[in-house]
């Protein structure tokens, strides 16, 4: 089955630690996105990538980093510089880069800082 | 700047009653508009989208939405709500420029009374 997988589903982190959230898609989509979701705030874009080895900052990129070494993978690292990382993180992809189209979402990772 | 407003944070309807969720957008040209649904702890699923053509759009699960340019609205409707429709609903608009980015509203939580 084609789709987007995110792992782990739940992640706990101690303050001061970096953690990496996995996002993989087998849809052969060009573009991939990372969103952060907090209650009552909708989805806010962290980073997006339209092509391998290239990515752009979204609206709330501070304290986060990404890489896009393979078309199917777009991992997100939450660094210790992110002041309030507890949130629900969603990865998405769309078929073409540079054009508006449906974004398909993974099941999400809930990150909790202890 | 582009924006999406969902005026109702929380709506409660009785099972079998009709439903309308409001969405207003700010956009200079013809927008690309989307409605997504999210069950608790899950990713987002596309209900329907409008790119051009007929302003009344049919989606999955019996939902429809109407694009009204004069009112800058894209309201979601369903004639008869089922208990399984209880979820959070997000309206989104495609951002300007060739980025593929979507701008999301803050979401409306739908509760269904038996």
Image (spheres, helix red, strand yellow):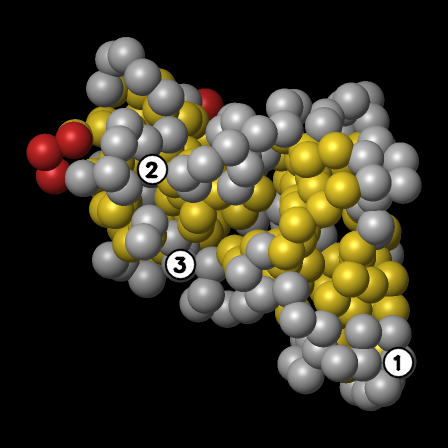
Q: Is residue A113 above or below residue A42?
A: below
- Marks 1, 2 in one chain: no
Pointer 2 and pointer 3: residues touching (CB < 8 Å)?
A: no
Chain of residue at mark 1: A
Q: In the shown orientation, is residue A69 left or right of residue B84? A: right
- Marks 2, 3 in one chain: yes
- Mark 1 to mark 3 CA distance (whole Å): 30 Å
Q: Secondary structure at mark 1?
A: loop
Q: Residue at x 72, y 26 (%)?
A: A29
Q: Which label is found at residue B106?
A: 3
Q: Residue at x 78, y 22 (%)?
A: A28
- Mark 2 to mark 3 CA distance (whole Å): 22 Å
> Nearer the observer, disc 1 or disc 2?
1
Name the residue nearer the viewer: A51 or B44: A51
Chain of residue at mark 2: B
At label 2, counting other C-alpha atoms closer than 10 Å, the crowd grade (few under 14, some 14-19, many 20 or more) is: many
Q: Position of residue B21 (x, y in %)?
A: 27, 45
Q: Which mark is first along the chain, 3 or 2? A: 2
- Mark 1 to mark 2 CA distance (whole Å): 45 Å
At label 3, counting other C-alpha atoms closer than 10 Å, the crowd grade (few under 14, some 14-19, many 20 or more) is: many
Q: Position of residue A40 (x, y in %)?
A: 44, 67
């Amino acid at each position: 089955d084609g789709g987007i997988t995110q792992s782990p589903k739940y992640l706990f982190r101690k303050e001061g630690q970096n953690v990496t959230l996995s996002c993989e898609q087998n849809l052969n989509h060009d573009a991939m996105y990372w969103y952060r979701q907090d209650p009552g705030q909708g989805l806010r874009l962290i980073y997006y990538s339209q092509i391998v080895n290239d990515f752009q900052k979204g609206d709330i990129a501070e304290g986060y980093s990404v890489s896009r070494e393979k078309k199917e993978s777009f991992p997100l690292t939450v660094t210790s510089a992110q002041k309030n990382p507890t949130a629900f993180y969603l990865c998405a992809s769309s078929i073409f880069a540079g054009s508006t189209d449906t974004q398909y979402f993974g099941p999400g990772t809930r990150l909790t800082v202890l | 700047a582009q924006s999406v407003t969902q005026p109702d944070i929380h709506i409660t309807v009785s099972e079998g009653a009709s439903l309308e969720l409001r969405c207003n957008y700010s956009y200079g040209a013809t927008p690309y508009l989307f409605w997504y649904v999210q069950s608790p702890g899950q990713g987002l699923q596309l209900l329907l989208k409008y790119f051009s053509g007929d302003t009344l759009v049919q989606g999955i699960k019996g939902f429809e939405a109407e694009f009204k340019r004069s009112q800058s609205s894209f309201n979601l409707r369903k004639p008869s709500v089922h208990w399984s429709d209880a979820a959070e609903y997000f309206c989104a608009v495609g951002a300007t420029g060739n980025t593929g980015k979507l701008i999301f509203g803050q979401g409306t939580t739908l509760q269904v009374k038996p």
